[in-house]
Every structure is written in structure tokens, then in C-alpha cells.
């Protein structure tokens, strides 16, 4: 009986060693394919090894399983970038997304970050073709996918925001610009500056469009929304004041004027605000039959603060008229 038991133990040991050797062989097969840059074969071998070796009690097998879990996402990354180089973007994104799923499954956070950054890069290149052709609808659709994968890709984020704005999707564009503007200034200073520049450009364009339509209420609504997002927004203060002036609500211009002036950082913008305040006092003075000397004095005081920008000559002419 002892001999039978010993034989069974020996057979089990031989089988275990054989199974372990087969597992190691599969891992080595993956390594050979990886070295040959045959990423498809490598991924298949490593995945097979992981599936069959994950429950092993052998330390060597488990160590190799851990290594294989790093190799599999890398294989999909290389396959994806190879297809991207050939401008086979759909296949590239399919492969990289497969790698993302594997990295998530295996708990490989570093691989996951690399894959998401690569996915964003592929979408950036793909969307860039449409963007350069001014096909903003296609560009925004593609860039949005890349932005979701990696919001820190600021070049793509800025192009996405611009695509939205060029399509007339002002709110969506501003949201992306604000997100960029809120990033760490020590790392993204140039992108933040560009975002703020483009926010001002498209906001002014939107304001001009609404003013042409005579829709000052929409401008005020837009400014209020901007101030809710950023209470220190100098641009929002200025366009709100312009809109109240357009509505000839001069009491509101006077009420909000000083705060708007203090918010401005550029002297030209500050002068523009002072001109609006001075003009509001002047309008009230004229409406009262030019009898209220206090209103006239206020108008002159603010108009004299207009020292630069496009309103200087108009301010001087108004002061001359008021003081003659």
C-alpha cells in the first residue's frame, strides 16, 4: 500500500511540474514574440498565461503573471500606435481601448494612464485633420472623445473649445476654456493664457452678435452666468455694463459701474468702463433738462478718467460740451 501511495504522489508531482513547465513555456513564448515586436502573438500568449497561471501557488509563476499583466496593455498600446501611424484611426482606437480594458482588469494604473494619454493623442491627430479642414463638427466629435480620455492634453482641449465656438456652441466652448484656465499655472501657464485670450475673443464675438440683434437681455444673462462661474471676471463686468447701457438703464450702469471699473486690469478696459459711467450721468443730466449740477459734475469727473482706448475723443468732446 505504501508503494501505491508513493507512486500516486510521484505522479502528481510530475503532473504539477509538467503543468508548471507548460505555463512557463507560454510566458517565454510571449517574451519571444514581444522581443520580435509581434505584439498580437505576444498579447495572446501573455493573456493565456495569465488566465492559467493566476491561481498557481508557485512563486515563480505568480511573479511572471504580475509581469505579464504589465506586458499585455503595452502590447495593445504598441499595436494601436502602429495603426495610428498608418492613419488607421478606428483600428488604433479599438486596440488602445482594448488595452485600457485590460489595464483596468489587471489593476495596472500606470499602464492605464499611458494608454489613455495615447488614446487622446490618436484622437488629437484624427480630429486635427478635420480641424485643419475647418470641419468643426467632425473635429469636435473626435476631440471630445480624446478630451474625455485625457483632459490634461491642453492642445486638444483648446482645439475642442474652438471647434465648439466656431459651431456656435458657445456654452460648451466656454466650459472647456474655463476648465483649461483653472489648471495648475505652474505647469500649464501657456495654455491658461491662451484659454483666457480665446474666451475673451469668443465672448466679445458673441456679445457683438447679440448686440447686433438688439438682444441686450441675453448679454446680461450671459454675463451673470460668467460671474456665477467666476465672480472676479472683468470681462463679464464690462459686457454687463455695456448691455445695461444699450438698454438705456442708466441708473443700473451707475450702480454697477464702479465695481466694473475696479475689476478691470487693462487701462483701456478701465477707460471704456469710465466712459460708460460718464455717459450714463450725462444722459441723466440731459434727461433732467440740464439742471442738476451734481449729475453734470459726475459726468465730467468720469469722462476725464478716460485716458486711453477708442473712447478718448468722444469723452473729450462730451466734456467740452458739458463745460462750455
Image: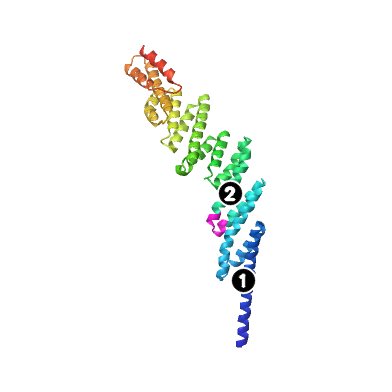
Q: Tell me, yes or no, if residue 55 can be seen here.
A: no
Residue marked by disc 2? 118
Q: Tell me, yes or no, if residue 124 can be seen here.
A: yes
Mark 2–mark 1 distance (CA, rounded to whole Å): 36 Å
In which quarter of the view is residue 258 placed? Answer: top left
Characterize the local packing of mark 1: few (<14), some (14-19) or many (20 or more) Cα atoms within 10 angstroms.
some
- The residue at 61%/67% (across/down) is 52
Q: Residue furthest bottom?
A: 1
All told, the count of numbered labels is 2
The quadrant of the picture occupied by the N terminus is bottom right
Residue 104 located within the stretch drawn in magenta: yes
Disc 1 secondary structure class: helix
Disc 2 secondary structure class: helix
Residue 132 located within the stretch drawn in magenta: no
Characterize the local packing of mark 2: few (<14), some (14-19) or many (20 or more) Cα atoms within 10 angstroms.
many
Q: Position of residue 18 (x, y in %)?
A: 64, 73
Residue marked by disc 1? 20
Q: Position of residue 308 (x, y in %)?
A: 42, 23
From the image, give the main secondary structure of the stretch colored magenta.
helix
Q: Position of residue 29 (x, y in %)?
A: 65, 64
Residue 181's disc number? none
Residues drawn in magenta: 103-111
Q: Residue furthest left?
A: 294
- The residue at 49%/39% (across/down) is 190
Amino acid at each position: 500500500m505504501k508503494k501505491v501511495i508513493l507512486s500516486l504522489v510521484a505522479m502528481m508531482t510530475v503532473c504539477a511540474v509538467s503543468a508548471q513547465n507548460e505555463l512557463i513555456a507560454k510566458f517565454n513564448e510571449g517574451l519571444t514574440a514581444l522581443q520580435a515586436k509581434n505584439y498580437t502573438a505576444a498579447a495572446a500568449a501573455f493573456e493565456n498565461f495569465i488566465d492559467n497561471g493566476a491561481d498557481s501557488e508557485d512563486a515563480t509563476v505568480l511573479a511572471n503573471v504580475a509581469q505579464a499583466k504589465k506586458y499585455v496593455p503595452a502590447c495593445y498600446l504598441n499595436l494601436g500606435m502602429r495603426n495610428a501611424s498608418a492613419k488607421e484611426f478606428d483600428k488604433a482606437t479599438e486596440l488602445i481601448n482594448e488595452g485600457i480594458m485590460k489595464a483596468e482588469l489587471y489593476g495596472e494604473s500606470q499602464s492605464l494612464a499611458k494608454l489613455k494619454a495615447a488614446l487622446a493623442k490618436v484622437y488629437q491627430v484624427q480630429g486635427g485633420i478635420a480641424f485643419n479642414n475647418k470641419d468643426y463638427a467632425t473635429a469636435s466629435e473626435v476631440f471630445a472623445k480624446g478630451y474625455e480620455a485625457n483632459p490634461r492634453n491642453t492642445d486638444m482641449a483648446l482645439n475642442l473649445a474652438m471647434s465648439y465656438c466656431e459651431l456656435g456652441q458657445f456654452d460648451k466652448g466656454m466650459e472647456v476654456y474655463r476648465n483649461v484656465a483653472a489648471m495648475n499655472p505652474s505647469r500649464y501657464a501657456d495654455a491658461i493664457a491662451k484659454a483666457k485670450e480665446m474666451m475673451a475673443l469668443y465672448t466679445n464675438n458673441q456679445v457683438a452678435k447679440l448686440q447686433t440683434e438688439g438682444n441686450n437681455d441675453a448679454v446680461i444673462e450671459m454675463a451673470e452666468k460668467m460671474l456665477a462661474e467666476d465672480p472676479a471676471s472683468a470681462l463679464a463686468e464690462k459686457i454687463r455694463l455695456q448691455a445695461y447701457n444699450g438698454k438705456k438703464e442708466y441708473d443700473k450702469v451707475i450702480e454697477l459701474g464702479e465695481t466694473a471699473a475696479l475689476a478691470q486690469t487693462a487701462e483701456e478696459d478701465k477707460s471704456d468702463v469710465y466712459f460708460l459711467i460718464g455717459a450714463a450721468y450725462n444722459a441723466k443730466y440731459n434727461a433732467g433738462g440740464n439742471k442738476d449740477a451734481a449729475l453734470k459734475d459726475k459726468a465730467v469727473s468720469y469722462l476725464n478718467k478716460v485716458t486711453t482706448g477708442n473712447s478718448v475723443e468722444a469723452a473729450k468732446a462730451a466734456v467740452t460740451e458739458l463745460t462750455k
